[in-house]
Each structure stands twice: as C-alpha cells, then as structure tokens.
Image (tube, rainbow, N blue to C red):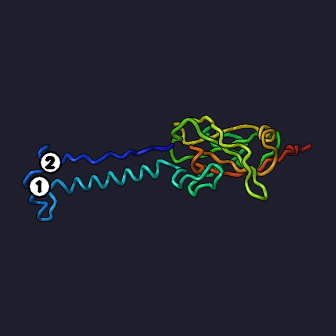
Amino acid sequence: MPFRVGRRRPQATLGSAAGPSRGAMASRRDGRLPGWAAPLLGWVAVLGLVAFVAIIVGRPGREAGTAGATGSPGPTSLPIAFGTAIDHDSGEASELTNHFRAGEPFAYSVHLPGPVGQSTIYVEVLRATTEGLDQVQAPQAQQTLPDRAVIAYLVTTDGLIQAFGAGDFVLRVYLDPTTDPLAVGSFTVVASPASTPT
C-alpha cells in the first residue's frame, strides 16, 4: 500500500505583492521574528514531521531499498502464517502448521497494520536446497481486496505438489516485485498423504 506524499515548492506569499512591510524589515534587522512567525514556524515543523511519518509508515516492506525479487528479505518483512483452513471471522490462516501432506488443504495469510491499499500483490516461491534458494515461481500477480488488512489464500497441497514437487519452500509476498518482500515465510510439503487411523 504505497502512499506517496508529494512535495510542494514553498510559496513566497508572506507580505504583500509589493514586498514585506517596513515593520517586518525592521524586526529582521534586530534579529527578532515578527509575532506571527513563531506560530507559523511551529505549524511548519509539525506538518514536516507528519509528512515524514506518513512516508515511513505508509510504505511497509519498501523502506529497506530495492533489492530484487530474489534478494534477501528486508528487515521489515512481515511473517506469513500457514495453516490448513481460513478462519471465517478474522480471514487469516487457522489450524496453524508449516508442514503439509498430500490431500490436505494449504492456507496462508499475512496480517498487515492497515489496509493493503491495492488490488494486486505478487507471490514468489523458492525451493530451499543445500546450496541456497532456487526460484520455482517468479513473482506472480494475485488479486486481493485492497480495503482489507489481511491477505489470505486457500489452495490444495496436491496442487502445490503438482506444480513444485515435495520439499522445503520459502514463500514471499510483494506489493511491488522490484522491492523487498512485504512478507516471508517457509513451509514443507510431503508427497505422501497423512496416515489415517484404522
């Protein structure tokens, strides 16, 4: 949800069109500010601080720079929760686990501090190997609800096995695939189904 705070050029509108008054010039010569200047400078400082906070808070997952989609997770990446269901009330992953077997549902969710702010996110999948991480799915566009503070999906483990095989994986979610991930999590897929009691 990248919010952008634009910069405006300061307007030289203090005083009349013909220039500042004689009293204002005199007060500048003796080093004192005119009576109206102190409150104005206070408001300018407050607005500058608010703009700075809006830039930092309004861009989750982007503060750390522009590492590529296969780069390391940023220090501000949120955790991804994995489970076998989606909670009807919260909309988040439930029955939490990061170990999945054939035949089971596969759910994941990311809880954000505020609404997503856009309808498209990007999901990348990497296989963890002894040499590092191998990309098995480049960041792929997925639709989400921009006014919700939760990103969540429910698929099947069988679909994951068919697409990627079994193994250990890292999932990364991006608002923009050219920046650091918004959220990162790891999970394991096992091809054999869960045993059922006899």
In the rendered structure, the answer to whether residue 120 lies left or right of residue 129 reads left
Label 2, secondary structure: give it. Answer: loop
Which numbered marker is on residue 135?
none
Q: Is residue 181 above or below residue 90?
A: below
Q: Is residue 192 above or below residue 28?
A: above
Q: For mark 1, does the 10 Å Cα neighbourhood hold few (<14), some (14 to 19), or many (20 or more) residues? A: some
Label 1, secondary structure: give it. Answer: helix
Look at 75% across and 50% down and name the residue there. Answer: 127
Residue 124 seen in this snapshot? yes
Residue 81 in picture, x, y percent from top left: 66, 48
Q: For mark 2, does the 10 Å Cα neighbourhood hold few (<14), some (14 to 19), or many (20 or more) residues? A: few
Residue placed furthest toward the front: 18
Look at 60% across and 44% down and name the residue there. Answer: 177
Front-most of 177 and 172? 177
Amino acid at the residue labelled 2: Gly
**Real-space CA distance between mark 2 and mark 1, rounded to the nearest whole angstrom:** 9 Å
Residue 1 in picture, x, y percent from top left: 51, 43
Residue 30 in picture, x, y percent from top left: 11, 65
- Count the marks: 2
In the rendered structure, the answer to whether residue 138 lies left or right of residue 39 reads right
In the rendered structure, the answer to whether residue 163 lies left or right of residue 149 reads right
Q: Give the residue number, with chain letter if any, for mark 1.
A: 24
Q: Is residue 99 above or below residue 142?
A: below
Look at 58% across and 55% down and name the residue there. Answer: 74
Look at 22% across and 53% down and name the residue there. Answer: 40
Amino acid at the residue labelled 1: Ala
In the rendered structure, the answer to whether residue 190 lies left or right of residue 124 reads right
Q: Give the residue number, with chain letter if any, for mark 2.
A: 15
Q: Decide: marks 2, 1 in contact (CB < 8 A)?
A: yes
